[in-house]
């Protein structure tokens, strides 16, 4: 497969899954019980005339496909409508929440890569020994602990019993050390599940390299262990990198729960409250934005990996532990 | 390939000592038996778990008559935990069974027939896998209007691609082996070959995956009920108990913690048994 064909194919895949996702989200909101016009006016008593006027204004009487294409057209021209609850454009409404979530996800992504890849390398190099088995068991426990349950246990132990970390919130806005201090415990909680996933992937990729001929040869030439590990890691990096989509999907999925546990005013809390308020534009925007980020990042990483090593077409991300970090 | 499996058999079959599984497996099985008993006879272990007793509300753990204390409505936390086993475990079992059935039907036909049908099924699996499942599940469960069985259905759809891929590749692996060639020669019929000859050989992998699906289903379903989607507000459920208990963290921390710990221990036990079976079945994890 030529490079351009690969890139085109990967981007097309990304586009298809975005279209399908938008279609699913839109049709879910369409078939949902309840009259959207009624929820727009809230609990007030209204005349049928007013309701039909609102329907007309929001094109709610149009056939399904017309509504969907109009919505896609608006979304492509970055016109996402107003939040029903707040009354002003969705993007302005979401921005401060998104900033919090991206800080949290970024912090735990950094921690997960350090811990996950590090322990994965250690466990592959110590295959079958005690260290490997300890890491293996703890990564099973990590993948099997629902993040919200783990978060609550950590919150109770470290914030409530020992009072080391703050209980909730994100601290004083603008004060970076304070914000980071508030985000540490939630980030650690998120990290546990995701780094367990990364340990598995890194370990199985590294196992092939550890026993390979070139590694043995390097050892025979007395090249320092650090250098050997580095070149092994470089060769094992492809499956780790292509799991980006998986890692981001589980991070964003888990962050919805974690934000609810630690009362962090991010996208997750916004999503759950908007869902209960039936604030349709906000729910659509958050779901599509996160889906788009996951899709595009994993496509970008796949293309990047392909450029460095064109012999790898695509590593199927069929690792079962994807759901582990939920 | 064939000779190695033969060697393995020769090495292990003659003097097979009765070997006890490791302690962690024994403990896991024991724990899951208790869970199964709680599930089967909730009224025996926790009679009238949902009866209110406002005068004894918010008692801390260790109070007389209430080992784990009481919740904000005066319900006994231990009884709630036992009564919640049902709603916490039945959903995951249905998810695992449902996605197993979809996986077996779609995966085996795709792997067996190949061609255009295989392309459609694989495209469906790839597409579903590329979706952020947890986010979609939350949005779907919330929008369609909660309901336990709606969440179960959404989860079955989101879990099935893993089963489809697994069964498909297992069937494709078996398909090219000589014993299947001979069944084809004997003209045994597709359904017959798939059910009687291929299935026994892939049953172990599928069973292990079934176990793992229960564990992940438990986590996903309790995540949804933690967010207030899925089960009703007055019902007993682990995820909901954990969420409700957050308000009582200072008066009775045992309410949240016991639910959180039981979810973790159950999921870990199921997963440990699954990976033990995987090891015993001789399948390489990598």
Image (spheres, coloured by chain):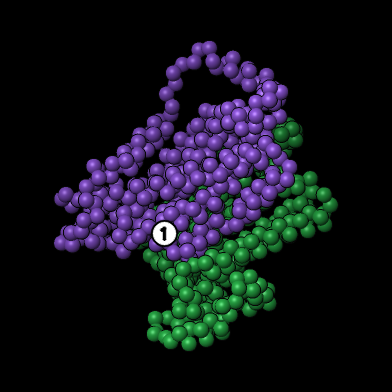
Q: Is residue B185 above or below residue A103?
A: above
Locate residue B201, reporting x and y percent: 59, 28
Q: Is residue A247 above or below residue B274?
A: below
The chain to which mark 1 is attached is B
Residue in view at x 75 percent, y 35 percent: A214
Residue highlighted by disc 1: B147
Left or right: A202 in relation to A144? right
Q: Is residue A97 above or below residue B154?
A: below
Regarding residue A206, the answer to whether it shows in the image is no
- Which residue in the rendered view is the most extreme toward the right? A2
Left or right: B163 in relation to B268? right
Left or right: A141 in relation to A232? left
Locate residue A215, reporting x and y percent: 72, 36
Q: How many marks?
A: 1
Tell which chain the image draws in green: A
Per the rendering, the colour in which chain B appears is purple
Taking depth in this image into account, of A158 and B64 the one nearest to the observer is: B64
Residue in view at x 39 percent, y 46 percent: B89
Which element type, helix, strand or loop, lies under badge 1?
Answer: loop
The quarter of the picture where residue B30 lies is top left
Residue in view at x 16 percent, y 49 percent: B65
Residue in view at x 73 percent, y 45 percent: B116
Left or right: B3 in relation to A191? right
Taking depth in this image into account, of B208 and B144 the one nearest to the observer is: B144
Q: Is residue B234 above or below residue A218?
A: below
Locate residue A266, reporting x and y percent: 49, 69
């Amino acid at each position: 497969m030529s490079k351009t064909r690969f890139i085109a194919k990967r981007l097309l895949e990304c586009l298809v899954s975005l279209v399908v996702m938008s279609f699913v989200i839109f049709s879910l909101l369409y078939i949902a019980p309840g009259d959207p016009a009624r929820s727009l006016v809230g609990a007030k008593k209204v005349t049928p005339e007013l309701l039909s006027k609102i329907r007309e204004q929001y094109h709610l009487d149009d056939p399904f496909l017309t509504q969907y294409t109009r919505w896609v057209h608006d979304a492509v021209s970055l016109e996402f409508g107003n939040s029903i609850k707040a009354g002003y454009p969705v993007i302005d409404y979401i921005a401060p929440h998104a900033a919090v979530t991206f800080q949290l996800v970024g912090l735990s992504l950094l921690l997960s890569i350090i811990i996950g890849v590090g322990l994965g390398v250690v466990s592959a190099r110590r295959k079958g020994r005690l260290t490997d088995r300890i890491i293996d068991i703890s990564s099973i426990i990590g993948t099997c602990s629902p993040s919200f349950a783990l978060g609550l246990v950590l919150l109770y132990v470290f914030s409530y019993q020992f009072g080391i970390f703050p209980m909730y919130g994100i601290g004083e806005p603008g004060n970076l050390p304070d914000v980071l201090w508030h985000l540490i415990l939630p980030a650690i909680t998120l990290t546990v599940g995701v780094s367990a996933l990364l340990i598995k992937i890194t370990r199985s990729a590294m196992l092939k390299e550890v026993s390979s001929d070139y590694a043995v040869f390097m050892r025979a030439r007395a090249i320092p262990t650090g250098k050997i590990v580095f070149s092994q890691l470089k060769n094992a990096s492809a499956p780790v990198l292509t799991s980006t989509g998986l890692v981001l999907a589980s991070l964003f999925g888990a962050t919805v729960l974690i934000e609810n546990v630690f009362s962090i005013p991010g996208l997750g809390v916004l999503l759950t409250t908007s869902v209960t308020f039936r604030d349709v534009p906000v729910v659509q925007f958050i779901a599509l934005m996160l889906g788009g980020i996951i899709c595009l990042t994993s496509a970008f990483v796949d293309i990047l990996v392909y450029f460095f090593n064109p012999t790898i077409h695509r590593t199927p991300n069929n690792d079962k532990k994807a759901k582990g970090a939920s | 390939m064939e000779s190695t499996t033969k060697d393995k058999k020769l090495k292990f079959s003659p003097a097979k000592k009765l070997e006890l599984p490791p302690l962690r497996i024994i403990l896991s099985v024991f724990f899951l038996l208790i869970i199964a008993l709680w599930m089967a006879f909730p009224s025996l272990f926790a009679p009238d778990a949902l009866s209110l007793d406002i005068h004894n509300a918010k008692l801390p753990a260790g109070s007389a008559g209430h080992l784990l204390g009481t919740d904000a409505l005066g319900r006994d936390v231990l009884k709630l935990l036992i009564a919640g086993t049902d709603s916490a475990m039945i959903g995951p079992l249905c998810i695992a069974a449902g996605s197993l059935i979809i996986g077996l039907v779609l995966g085996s036909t795709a792997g067996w027939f190949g061609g255009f049908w295989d392309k459609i099924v694989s495209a469906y699996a790839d597409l579903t896998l590329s979706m952020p499942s947890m986010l979609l599940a939350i949005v779907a469960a919330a929008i369609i209007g909660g309901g336990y069985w709606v969440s179960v259905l959404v989860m079955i759809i989101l879990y099935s691609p893993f089963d489809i891929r697994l069964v498909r590749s297992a069937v494709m692996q078996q398909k090219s082996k000589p014993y299947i060639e001979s069944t084809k020669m004997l003209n045994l019929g597709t359904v017959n070959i798939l059910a009687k000859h291929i299935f026994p050989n892939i049953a172990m992998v599928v069973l292990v995956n079934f176990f793992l699906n229960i564990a992940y289903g438990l986590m996903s379903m309790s995540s949804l009920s933690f967010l207030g989607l899925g089960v009703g507000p007055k019902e007993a459920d682990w995820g909901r108990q954990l969420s409700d208990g957050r308000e009582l963290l200072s008066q009775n921390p045992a309410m949240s913690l016991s639910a959180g710990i039981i979810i973790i221990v159950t999921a870990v036990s199921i997963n440990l048994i699954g990976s033990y079976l995987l090891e015993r079945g001789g399948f390489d994890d990598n």
